[in-house]
């Protein structure tokens, strides 16, 4: 595989200040340039896809999946914000593992340095705990039908793990937690629960995600759903 160009300092600014899922991360440091330069030094040598496609792949597979897994697991434990959820050590460990699973797909596909990519995951986790952000779980978790679609932030990385034969147990749990999402003010959440009641978890999951109802991964997700 050919090596892609390394990011410029502007690329690292984008990594620090760009959107996490659908909310904007704001750098509250007095010296943001110093932080950017230090992050560039710690990630020097990262190889990855050039241009918009590579940036979107990193955002979707890491920030997006980590963000939504935090929300759905946090909802199950009764938390109101992403920060509250990620400060729970059990949830933080599970979110880290889900991001490692989705990140392993990027490492395989694009040739990222695994050690530096792990540092990038830790950077994202620290953003989720940013005390200046008040990101409500119901805002992040809303529209679960869209977020469970094959091309979105949960099932897309899961499909990547299946493609490369990589572990995906924590992504499975994130999807199972999404099936439990309830919000009377969200029409998609109401529709999802109606589908589950009408079809049962396996058929509902297959319809929403496009996964094969008879597949091993659907059976595994349903088993997790039933124990959460």
Image (cartoon, rainbow, N blue to C red):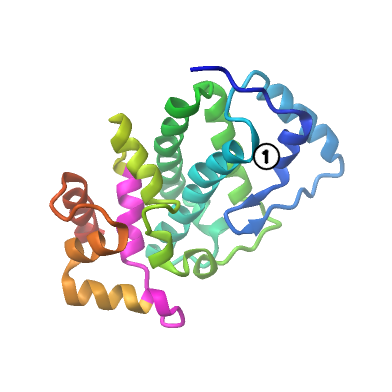
User: Farthest residue in the left direction?
Assistant: 214
The magenta region covers: 170-189
- Name the residue located 31 percent from the left edge and 34 percent from the top edge: 163
Q: Return the x and y of residue 147 as percentages of the image width and height.
A: 43, 60
**Residue closest to the eye, 72 or 81:** 72
Q: Return the x and y of residue 193 as percentages of the image width and height.
A: 29, 75
Q: Return the x and y of residue 69 as percentages of the image width and height.
A: 43, 53
- Name the residue located 64 percent from the left edge and 18 percent from the top edge: 45
In the displayed structure image, the side of residue 201 where residue 129 appears, left or right? right
Is residue 87 depicted above or below 57 in this figure? Answer: below
Q: Return the x and y of residue 106 as percentages of the image width and height.
A: 47, 32
Determine if residue 183 is in view: no
40 is within the stretch colored magenta: no
Query: Which residue carries the number 1 mark?
Result: 15
Is residue 207 depicted above or below 42 in this figure? Answer: below
- Name the residue located 58 percent from the left edge and 27 percent from the top edge: 48
Name the element at disc 1: helix
183 is within the stretch colored magenta: yes
**Residue closest to the eye, 116 or 91:** 116
- Name the residue located 71 percent from the left edge and 57 percent from the top edge: 132
Our reading of the magenta stretch's main secondary structure is helix
In the displayed structure image, the side of residue 24 where residue 68 appears, left or right? left
Alpha-carbon neighbours of circle 1 within 10 Å: few (<14), some, or many (≥20)?
many
């Amino acid at each position: 595989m050919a090596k892609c160009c390394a990011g410029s300092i502007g690329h690292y600014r984008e990594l620090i200040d760009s959107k996490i899922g659908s909310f904007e991360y704001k750098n509250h440091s007095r010296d943001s340039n110093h932080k950017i330069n230090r992050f560039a030094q710690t990630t020097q040598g990262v190889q990855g896809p050039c241009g918009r496609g590579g940036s979107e792949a990193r955002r979707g597979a890491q920030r997006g999946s980590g963000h939504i897994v935090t929300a759905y697991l946090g909802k199950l434990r009764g938390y109101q914000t992403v920060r509250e959820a990620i400060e729970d050590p059990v949830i933080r460990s599970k979110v880290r593992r889900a991001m490692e699973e989705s990140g392993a797909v990027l490492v395989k596909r694009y040739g990222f340095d695994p050690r530096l990519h792990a540092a990038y995951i830790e950077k994202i986790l620290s953003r989720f705990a940013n005390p200046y952000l008040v990101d409500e779980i119901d805002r992040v978790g809303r529209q679960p039908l869209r977020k469970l679609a094959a091309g979105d932030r949960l099932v897309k990385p899961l499909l990547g793990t299946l493609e490369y034969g990589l572990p995906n147990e924590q992504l499975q749990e994130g999807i199972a937690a999404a099936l439990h999402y309830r919000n009377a003010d969200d029409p998609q959440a109401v529709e999802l629960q109606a589908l589950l009641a009408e079809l049962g978890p396996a058929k509902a999951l297959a319809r929403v995600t496009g996964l094969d109802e008879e597949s091993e991964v659907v059976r595994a997700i349903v088993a997790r759903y039933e124990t959460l």
